[in-house]
Image (cartoon, rainbow, N blue to C red):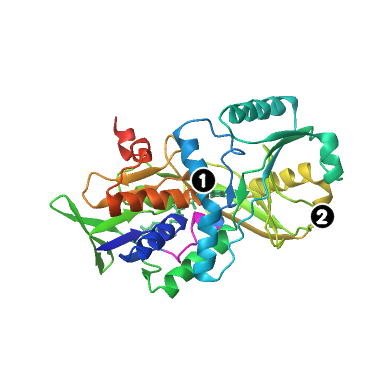
Amino acid sequence: MRIVLVGGGVIGLSIAREFHKLGYETVILDKNKLGKGASWVAGGMLAPQSEGLKPGIFLDFCLESRNMYEKFAREIEIDTGMDVGYWKSGIFCPAFSIEEKEKLLSNLETYKNIGLSGKWIDRSDLENIYPSLGEDIIGGVLYPDDAQVDNRLLMEALTHYCNINNIKYYENTKVDSILTENGRFKAVKSGDLYVDGDICIICAGAWSGELADIPVFPIKGEMAAVDVKREDIDKVFFSSKAYLIPRKDYSRLVIGATEEKVGFKDGNTVKGTLQLLDGLLKTFPHMINRNLQELWFGYRPATPDLEPIIGESNIKGLYYATGHHRNGILLAPITAKVIVDLIHKNKKSKYLEAFSYERFNQ
Ligand SMILES: Cc1cc2nc3c(=O)[nH]c(=O)nc-3n(C[C@H](O)[C@H](O)[C@H](O)COP(=O)(O)OP(=O)(O)OC[C@H]3O[C@@H](n4cnc5c(N)ncnc54)[C@H](O)[C@@H]3O)c2cc1C
C-alpha cells in the first residue's frame, strides 16, 4: 500500500516515520525543502498549560501529546543518532500586572482541579534566582510539566530518518492538484509529475486550503534570536510580552512571537522586531547588549476555531492532518498516532470526530 504525503513538515514527516515503521511505502512531496515551513520557524514549546488552554477535548489532545513527547524524542534520537533538544525544564509565566496575576491564578486553579501541576512564585523568591528581573514582574506561575524541543534539530533528524531509511521524497515539487477516480483518491499532480497511491494525506500546513476545500489560512508570526548565557535563564519564560526560549545547549535564546492575520506577507517588520525585543528587555533588561543572531518569520496553519483538521475527507482515501495553528510541534506525535491508527487499524479515536473537517460544513 502506498501512502502519498503532501507536505514534509513536522506533521508529514512524523506520519511518514510511523508508516515506514509499519512497512508501508511512503512518498512525500514538498514545494520547498523538507522541514522548512512553519515547523522550522516555530519556538518548539510543548506548552498546553502555559498557553492557557481551557479544559476540553483540545486540551486533552495536547496533554496526551505532551505525555508522548519524551519517548517520541528519544526514539527519534535512537533511530537517527541525532539530538533533538528535548528539555523538560518547565515553563514559567511571569505576571506584569495584578490583572495578569489574577488570570494566571485562575488558570492555575482550573488546572489543579483537573489534576495538573503548577505553582505560583512570588517576586521575592524569583529575585534569588534571577537578580536582573524586569521591574514590572510581580511573580508568576511555573508549570513544571511543560517542556520544549528544538524544532530545527527535530526537523533535521526527521529528514535524516527519511534519508537513512530510503523514504522517497520530492523536494521543490509543488502539488498543483489532487486527482480522483470514482470518488476515490488516485494521484497527485505536480507539473508533469504524477504520483499515484492508495492513500493521500494533506499535511501542507498553512497552504492546505489551496489544495482542498478546507478553511485553513495563515497566521503570520515573527521571531528573533539573541546570544544567551546559562546564568541568564534556566527555563522557558512565557508572558503576554513575549516568550523566551533558551535552547538546551545555550546556543541561542529564541524570542517569539507576533501574531498577525495578513495573509502570506513575507518579511520581518520594524514593528514586529521592536515588539519581540521589548518583550525580552521587559523580562531581562540586562540583555540589552547581547548580539542579535537572527530574525525570521513564518505562517501558522490556522482554522476558524483554531483547532486542527484531522481524518478522512469526503473523498475515499484522501485524508487531512493540518490546521495545528500554535501547537503543531507539540501535536506531531498524537496526530501521527491518530492518523496511522485510523488507516492501519481502522481504529477511530475520539479525536477524529472533534477535529473532523465536517464541523465547518454545518
Ligand atoms: C512563529 C511561530 C511560532 C510557533 N511556535 C510553536 C511552538 O512553540 N510550539 C508548537 O507546538 N507549535 C508552534 N508553532 C506552530 C507550528 O510551527 C505549526 O503548527 C506546525 O509546524 C505545523 O506543521 P505542518 O507540518 O502542518 O506545517 P509546515 O511545517 O508548514 O509544513 C507544511 C509543508 O507543506 C509544504 N507544502 C505546502 N503546500 C504544498 C504543496 N502544494 N505541494 C507540496 N508541498 C506543499 C510546505 O512547503 C511545508 O514544508 C509556531 C508557528 C509559528 C509560525
Q: Position of residue 3 (x, y in %)?
A: 29, 61
Label 2 element class? loop
Q: Which residue is mark 1?
A: 327
* Amino acid at dot 2: Glu
Q: Quadrant of residue 295?
A: bottom right
Residue 58 can be seen in this image: yes
The reply to whether the magenta stretch includes residue 35 is yes
**Position of 246 compared to 49: left or right?**
right
Placement of the N terminus among the 4 image quadrants: bottom left
Image check: 43 left or right of 199?
right
Does residue 18 appear to the left or right of 348 in the view shown?
A: right
Is the stretch drawn in magenta largely helix, strand or loop? loop
Q: Nearer the viewer, residue 357 or 147?
A: 147
Q: Is residue 130 visible?
A: no
Mark 1, Cα crowd under 10 Å, few <14 / some 14-19 / many 20+, is many
Q: CA distance from mark 2 to mark 1?
A: 29 Å
Element marked by disc 1: helix
Amino acid type at image mark 1:
Asn
Residue range in magenta is: 32-40
Count up the numbered dots: 2
Which one is in front, 258 or 85?
85
Q: For the residue with label 1, is its CB less than 8 Å from the closest atom of ligand 1?
A: yes
At 67% from the left and 44% from the top, the residue drawn is 91
Residue 231 badge = 2
Q: Position of residue 15 (x, y in %)?
A: 39, 57
Residue extending furthest toward the left: 182
Left or right, residue 270 beside residue 36 = right
